[in-house]
Amino acid sequence: MEAAAEPGNLAGVRHIILVLSGKGGVGKSTISTELALALRHAGKKVGILDVDLCGPSIPRMLQVQGKAVHQCDSGWVPVFVDQEQSISLMSVGFLLEKPDEAVVWRGPKKNALIKQFVSDVAWGQLDYLVVDTPPGTSDEHMAVVDTLRPYSPLGALVVTTPQAVSVGDVRRELTFCKKVGLRVIGVVENMSGFVCPHCAECTNVFSRGGGEELARHAGVPFLGSVPLDPELTRSLEEGRDFIRGFPESPAFPALSCIAQKILNEAPVGLS
Amino acid sequence: MEEVPHDCPGVGSAQAGRGASCQGCPNQGLCASGAGAAPDPAIEEIKEKMKTVKHKILVLSGKGGVGKSTFSAHLAHGLAEDENTQVALLDIDICGPSIPKIMGLEGEQVHQSGSGWSPVFLEDNLGVMSVGFLLSSPDDAVIWRGPKKNGMIKQFLRDVDWGEVDYLIVDTPPGTSDEHLSAVQYLAAAHIDGAVIITTPQEVSLQDVRKEISFCHKVKLPVIGVVENMSGFICPKCQKETQIFPPTTGGAEVMCHDLKVPLLGKVPLDPRIGKSCDKGQSFLVEAPDSPATLAYRSIIQRIQEFCSLRQPKGENLVGS
């Protein structure tokens, strides 16, 4: 296998952000997608790398499932999700012949593909590359961190939901970050309360407070709580741009805040 | 894609390590040495060990966060309510072991005896094993690659002294990878009754769950059925229902119909479920009148009925 055949492929990427969680189903892919959309709205060029090999969710969220991936001299050409080519995406989802086909691979094979994804995608010039990961602290995470290390990623956004069962796993993810020397940009608490559309009563469907407590315990910034909004889920299901379509949503302020934090931390001049 | 050996001839095949597609695979040396070709002796050992276990159920989902561990725990609680039923709950989520917390057993330790590892007993008839019990701190991360995770799963199946068990429930992490392959491989000779597959209503979950069902078919694992979790939310104030996770493509019902697998039931979102799990209490006991409890109980009954139709060990088994 060619090792780091094209070191130049990430040379044009200004900042790399990993989105992690120890826990599954907390909204990593959702937050990755919404962050990319928010950064795009701020005029930035964004790439998304979806390294969840078993459950590649992002192509569908951006309505590009089933698109073909082409090769060029420098490697694979990522799929552009919009006409203006301001968001590009690479996911194993594009490489599956049938969408219901399971990727049943053991660790070493997953490592090999992730290394290729990181090194051999011709991203071109990007302001931000958002890397969405599967849950856990295993092969994929080690492969991604090792392969990205030479490019000094900005850090990790760590996503949790409020309840103790999630926080219990995400604490371990924060330990992983420390062990591999990955800076934690901050913790995001997702699914943080639900406002009933009929009577406006707010119910803490998945408990409350865990994210903030976790950030405090680990000594990392707390970036905000994103409440449950069925419109957000629906937008992702239907590939609509939530950031553009729902500025009044209760989820909007928190998502904007996260994007603003990234923009402040890692500003990019006029692209 | 040429560099990635997805045309892997299979670690057990004569071509292992020698085929053209093996070039560059990190396992090439291991396969070429023939080490991968011999069947793992653990498979026979596990078959022996599993002779005292009547029914084995895997709880799977392609998707994370849909409620596998919550369901596994409450399946165990529900079955163990009959004190004459011996229940074992095995958590093979090595990176994110949630079961100790959900069962209220955080901080418990595993003991070794002459006959192997002792599971942690919540009740006389409910034993639990998880990597969580082997970690000294809640902040400890298990940063293991596939082969090491497989080794742990092998040990759990081979070395835990479960005793006489009516139901062994195996809770799995999300995905279709090492843990799932290992569980199926190591239990191959011991006959798994089937898999319960958990999903939530929205397409982003169903998309992954279809892959999981495809995985089950590939490894010839019977599918007991699908549970649709977080299926609707009743506001505690105004009692009106909202679909927090909208079934934009018809939910599990349509998927099950398309893939011809049974839908075991739909469990609505009840905020008390999360609270019970956080406290390590059985939701079935904490909220006996909740529509979610009624749904769980109905599903558990259907699983019991499915298992009772399977021939017990020792009799002529239909090939698995």
Image (cartoon, coloured by chain):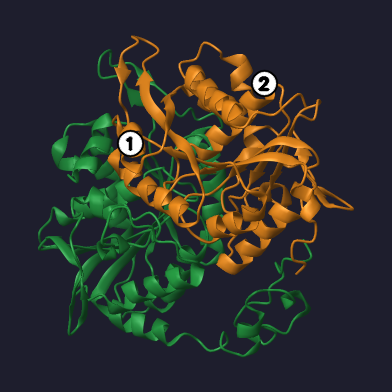
Q: In this view, does B202 lie above or below B97?
A: above
Q: Which amino acid does label 2 sit on?
A: Ala
**Count of numbered circles on the image:** 2
Residue of label 1: A216
Question: Where is residue A257 shown, x and y percent of the image?
Answer: 51, 22
Image colour for chain A is orange
Q: Mark 1 lies on which chain?
A: A
Question: Where is residue B224 shown, x and y percent of the image?
Answer: 40, 55
B158 sits to left or right of B162: right
Q: Is residue B20 above or below residue B61?
A: below
Quadrant location, the N terminus of chain A: bottom right
Residue appearing at x 74%, y 66% in the figure: A3
Residue of label 2: A42
Residue appearing at x 18%, y 45% in the figure: B282
Tags 2 and 1 on a common chain: yes
Residue appearing at x 50%, y 34% in the figure: B202
User: Could you tell me if residue A122 is visible in this image?
Assistant: yes
Q: Is residue B117 above or below residue A251?
A: below
B9 sits to left or right of B105: right
Local SS, label 2: loop
Quadrant location, the C terminus of chain A: top right
The first of marks 2 and 1 along the sequence is: 2
Q: Which chain carries label 2?
A: A
Q: Which amino acid does label 1 sit on?
A: Arg
Local SS, label 1: helix
- For label 2, the crowd category at 10 Å Cα-Cα, with few meaning under 14, some 14 to 19 and many 20 or more, is few
Chain drawn green in the picture: B
Q: Nearer the viewer, residue B72 or A62?
A: A62
Which quadrant of the view contains residue B144? bottom left
Question: Where is residue B175 shown, x and y percent of the image?
Answer: 50, 54
